[in-house]
Image: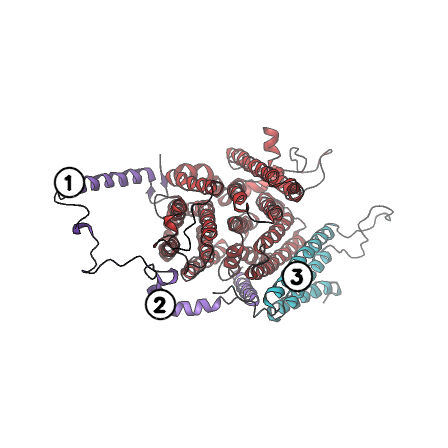
Amino acid sequence: MTALTTHAPILLIALPLLGAFATPLVGKLGRGVRNTLIGLIVLAVAGLAALLAVDVFAASGVPTIYELGGGTFTFPLSGGQVPIRILFEVDGMSAFMGLIAALIALTGAFFSFSYWKERSGGNLYFSLFLMLTAGIFGMVLTGDMFNFFVFLEITSIAAASLVGFRIWRKQSQEAGFKVMAMYTLSGLFVLLAIGLLYGQYGHLNIATLANSIQGSLTDMIALGLLLTGLAMKAGAVPMHMWAPDAYGEAPAPMSAVLVANSQASLYGLFRILFTLFGVTISTGTMGWILIVLALLTIFVGVTMALIQSDLKRLVAFGAVSQIGYMLLGVGVGLAVMAARPEYGLVAMQGGIFHMLNDAACVGLLFFASGAVIQAAGTRDLNQMGGLGHQMKWTSIFFAIGAVALAGVPPFNGFASKFLIYEASFKLSPFLAVIAVLSSIMLLAVFVKAFQAAFLGPRSNASAHVSDPSPGMMLPMVALVLVIIVFGLFPGFFVDHIVTPAAKALWDGRDAYINAVLGG
Amino acid sequence: MNIGNLPFVVAALLVLFGLYTFLFKRNLIKLVIGITLIETGVNLFLVTLGYRTNGISPIYTFAPEAQKMVLPTPQALTLTSIVIGLATTALLLSFAVFIHRHYGTLDVRKVKELKG
Amino acid sequence: MRGLSSGFGMWNPIAWALLFVGILVVSFIVRSLGNKGYKRGTGQTKVFLSGNDEPEASNGLHVRGDHLYWGMVDGLSAYYRRVRAWHTGILSDYAAWFVGVLALVFVILVLVR
């Protein structure tokens, strides 16, 4: 077991990657064999992520370092070690993101097995899905800037291919081109910034860079490029316009994994702001930039969602809006980090806890939307109706996901939003006002979607629909259980899972540097 | 101005030209060319970072004694970036082919079904 | 369970759920002490629509998607006209917004440092 825990970081990336390349070959043997292989891989990935998280959270603030070969890490290279110094440094925040990615990959894979039963092209679809999962894990576990860029590009290519997967549908191709162009643009600017930092200091490792960084003009330019590039990839307004296209046109299970991809870029942004730059920059300014982006995202996201007539685009705008809550929580924490008041840590706990809650709720909403669109045969909300008579369980799950995302007690969305509201109110009441009003408007948005799709008299066109097969219901049930359990016991989960992640960013910079450079 | 700074200036100009092409041209293929220009500029910037004056190639076989070498790491970074650029350009161009097949046009101002 | 505490407040969902169930029980007890002269199936239980008959479940009864919040959208129409117009579907505009925010961030960072 300890060998498995030691090698968990590299296995979390290697297993999906090998699976991605093996799937087209294994798929020739039949669909059952392929599904078994992929099911085993995602179960193994989920187990490894849980093991790694338990190990890292128990180490209480000291990050785990993995170098290739699995030996103990010593800073000057001693004889007999593999001379590759690309390290994986897993601290509380990385392990938390790994848990989110594992949850979404697990439910997405099992939903996809049933969703693709009557469709063709499943081999390529699952291959791209495994590559996207490998890329997400690579982004959150790595301790090296250029390695981060490589995994960023892997996820970009896999995500854009999944968005444009349905080549018979012209909107998918348009969305795929737009997504790929925007991702490549942001990736190139991120690479430019990494080149600037490398030219200045000669290192690529995040910990050694953090040790040597000063706030010179070149560093500020690099920070601007990294901030904007990664915020664009996460979907911050006003650079968010690719996001509704992408989440709306991807196949339904993959929209959830694309949201996890955006959260991984958000993780990269936090890693750079808190650990790489940390106290060398004016954290008040950076925090307020994040807060302004967050307010814009929250408000524009939810108001644009109200006027959509395409179901998946509506849920996509809702997902964009929730990214704003994460930015708001962590932005408030960053803005007050110099003075270290108590509510800064509370704000970060709220923002980080909201990442997990949002992944579960938005995942559930996208799965339910996929089931609804498959049953109704149309995506237009103006033509659907009366599905609630025959699809009782799907309507209940959709309602639970919507109500949880809008922050209604006692579900998990309220727990994280409660922390964000209270802490941001302390910084400035205007922030909390916008956040609460947008939560209410999000409830209005989902009432519109629920009413249009599920309520109303039975229609003749949908006389033959029923609840989707158990293969599609079980992942939704799993996410509903996550929502209910995290909602009923938030204190337990915040203390044991979220606080190590928040503390790793809030005051874990020295521990991060010392883990590599020693003492 | 130091003549050794010229590659950096050229890299910056390439990035700016690529950004101009991406923002102001209408044909989808020209947008892809713009991305390729930005990529070329960034790759040139990365390779130039490693140059040391009067350095030789970083190969130890048959190297003369006590000779300064250029840094090998940026060359590895650039190779990786070139390969990634190949994959992204291929994907972008295949999407452009499908867009032309569906929409009948390559004008980016007409490919706007997903709006609002 | 202990519940979640921010620095200023406390949220205990178990206590909330127990309170909610308690209120439901109380309201159910109050309801069951109700009117004894109440008969099902007669005119007492039909929906009151100002004396009109309940319409048939035909097309046009179900308020479709976009019509549900038309009042709110109409009230905010000044905002929506501008913001919806910004969401052109054109890729060059997406990149223009990106470069605009990048320039703004550069200006802020270089000025404040």
Say which element carries label 2: helix
Chain that is coloured red in the picture: A
Circles 1 and 2 on the same subunit: yes
Q: Hey, which quadrant is residue B81 in on the image?
A: bottom right
Q: Residue at x 60, y 54 (%)?
A: A161
Chain that is coloured cyan in the picture: B
Chain that is coloured purple in the picture: C
Which chain hosts label 2?
A: C
Q: Tag 1: residue type?
A: Leu
Q: Hey, which quadrant is residue B112 in on the image?
A: bottom right
- Foreground of the two, A358 or B20: A358
First in sequence, mark 1 or 2: give its number: 1
Q: CA distance from mark 3 to mark 1?
A: 73 Å
Q: Local crowd at mark 2 within 10 Å, few (<14), some, or many (≥20)?
A: few
Q: CA distance from mark 2 to mark 3?
A: 42 Å
**Residue A333 is at least partly visible in this image:** no
Q: Quadrant of the N terminus of chain A?
A: top right
Question: Which mark is nearer the camera, 3 or 1?
Answer: 1
Q: Is residue A165 above or below residue C26?
A: below
Q: Tag 2: residue type?
A: Asp
Say which element carries label 3: helix
Q: Tag 3: residue type?
A: Leu
Q: How is the image coloured?
A: by chain
Q: Which residue is mark 1?
A: C33
Circles 3 and 1 on the same subunit: no
Which chain hosts label 3?
A: B
Q: Local crowd at mark 3 within 10 Å, few (<14), some, or many (≥20)?
A: some
Q: Which residue is mark 2?
A: C74
Q: Which mark is residue B93?
A: 3
Task: Describe residue A115's horizontal placement relative to residue A27 as left or right.
Answer: left
